[in-house]
Image (cartoon, grey):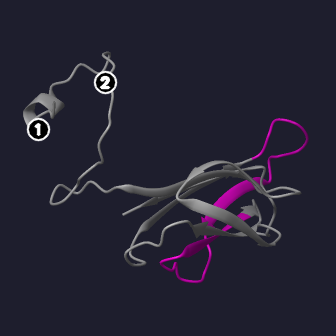
Amino acid sequence: MALSKIQAESMNLADTYAFTGTVSGAGEGVGNVEAWVNFNGKNTVAIRDSANVSSITDNGTGDYTVNFSTAMADANYCVLIQSGEDTSGSHSNHIGANLHRSAPTTSACRVNTSSLNGSAVDHEFIFVGIIR
């Protein structure tokens, strides 16, 4: 059963609801999550889990390409990036994650991770979300 806008806005957030459809944001400023990935960017790059991501390409220290399984309709999507380190060793200089200077394409986007001083460094935990 679909909820109307009024019903959805008055739901008790303490309750649990199952969602089996897609998010449709046409005209309401809400987008769809088109792809996401959680991957290890240190040593052997490996995807922990993902949706609509076929692979990660390691382009060098702190430089990765996220390849989509199904191409985007266009390259006008939003890329959300977060990264971090584990609790072992020194991780205070591993703080930055950003979109690479090259433009996203319909088939991939490139992301970078860096240290406090801006130099490229590999991060253990990298999270990328694509919203359209």
Q: Quadrant of the N terminus?
A: top left
Does dot 1 land on a helix, a strand or a loop? helix
Q: From the top left corner, tell me how far across and down residue 71 is, in percent.
A: 47, 73
Inspect the image, locate mark 2, and give the three-letter code of the amino acid beneath it.
Answer: Tyr
Q: Quadrant of residue 115?
A: bottom right
Q: Is residue 110 magenta?
A: yes
Query: Mark 1 Cα within 10 Å, few/some/many (few <14, many 20+)?
Result: few
Q: Position of residue 121 (x, y in %)?
A: 81, 63
Q: Magenta segment: does it hold 99?
A: yes
- Eyeballing the image, is 86 above or below 44? above
The region drawn magenta spans 85-113
> Going 57% across and 74% down the picture, which residue do you hit?
108
Does 42 appear above or below 108?
above
Amino acid residing under circle 1: Lys
Question: Can you tell which mark lies on residue 5?
Answer: 1
Q: Where is residue 12 shown, x and y percent of the image?
A: 24, 19
- Taking the image as shown, residue 96 lies to the left or right of residue 7, namely right
